[in-house]
Amino acid sequence: MEHSARLNKTVLERYMELLPEGMVQAMYVWIDGTGEGMRCKTKTLDFIPKSVKEIPVWNYDGSSTYQAEGSNSDMYLVPVAMFNDPFRRGDNKLVLCDVYKYDNRPAETNHRKSCNEVMERARVDEPWFGIEQEYTLLSQDGHPFGWPKMGFPGPQGPYYCGVGANKVYGRDVVEAHYRACLYAGVKIAGTNAEVMPAQWEFQVGPCLGISMGDHLWMARFLLQRVAEDFGVTVTFDPKPMEGDWNGAGAHTNYSTKPMREDGGIKHIKDAIVKLSKKHVEHIRLYDPKDGGDNARRLTGKHETSSIHDFSSGVANRGASIRIPRQVGEDGKGYMEDRRPSSNCDPYRVTEAIVRTTVLDDWSDFQ
């Protein structure tokens, strides 16, 4: 069987150079019923949208995305964020969407609605986020990209931020993704090779409130789409390889306006105390399986804390919450929640953090 990666991309380019006047291809992107997978389809617009509010609501078959039964399968796509399309270019757009059921209720995996309501309530505190998204590249057979087919690469040590063909695998995917994000308007802040070979990280932020989830989900979509062109796959599994290999997380950096001002370290420490009292609730929300995925990763080894215990410390990568050393010296800044898994829903993570540290309110949590 021929892999799609073997299609001749130079033939495609002849057609991609065609730019129909006054017509726009809008690719609608949404989260499917797994809470991890993403889907997309394209609609032709006969105008160039200046705002996401101009893009029409659309629908799709939810019975094919684990979100509805065939007897009542229509789901609705409500555009919420618009980005430039780095694949089709020109005036074409990528459109991130909320998903709603036939009765106007949000789909079970539509956590953006609740998150947005919480961010609006906390607007005066200006919650900023930055997420460090780790992931692993795989060959199409599911084996880590670049690893020997029989056996394993050498032990961890030379791979983190490494350089050289014997230390890093798949850099072309990383570089292409970086440029695609910049073109799209995603707030990508940087990239680096991670501790396990074939594992990488990109950072998104700083983002205010709801935009954190919007930009991270679109960055994930772009990564999957770029990898498709290279014939490799991406996994956000938090522990893709058992044994003495690092897992993958989505470390979440967080601050509020009071934390960023002089004397902000007090507000950071107060927030950590609040987080310590809601550890179980946060763990349940920090991966799609109510903590089941993180149980494989948060073992207290490989730069993680134990899933069972809450801890914090300055410059401590084995703690639940890390205060960067520079923040400790400056007496203000931000903190890092190292518990979210690589396959977390950033809407759930950021909502939980703001509910606990700013609103002190979980009463209406769904």
Image (spheres, rainbow, N blue to C red):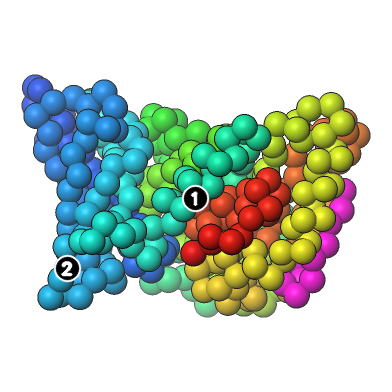
Q: Is residue 52 above or below residue 364?
A: above
Which label was assigned to residue 345? none
Query: Which quarter of the figure is the N terminus placed in?
Result: bottom left
Q: Disc 2 designates what residue?
A: 73
Q: Is residue 262 visible?
A: yes
The magenta-colored residue range is 301-315
Q: Which mark sits nearer the N-terminus, 1 or 2? A: 2
Residue at position x 34%, y 34% in the image: 83
* Residue 288 on the magenta segment: no
Along the line of sight, which residue is nearer the eye, 150 or 88? 88
Residue at 16% in and 62% down: 74
Where does residue 259 sit, x and y in percent of width and height? 77, 35
Locate residue 95 relative to residue 178 in the image: left or right: left
Q: Secondary structure at mark 2?
A: loop
Q: In the image, what residue occupies the spot 18% across and 25% down?
A: 48
Q: Main secondary structure of the magenta part?
A: loop
- Picture layout, residue 258 above or below residue 243: above
**Contact (CB < 8 A) between labels 1 and 2?**
no
Q: Is residue 91 above or below residue 350?
A: above
- Report the disc number at residue 115: 1
Q: Residue furthest front?
A: 363
Q: What is the spatial separation of the Cα atoms under label 1 and label 2, in whole angstroms? A: 26 Å
Residue shown at 79%/52% (left/top)?
272
Crowding at mark 2 (Cα within 10 Å: few <14, some 14-19, many 20+): some
In this rendering, would 313 be left or right of 231? right
- Label 1: how many residues lie within 10 Å, few (<14), some (14-19) or many (20+)? many
Q: Amino acid at mark 2?
A: Ser
136 or 150, which is in the foreground? 136
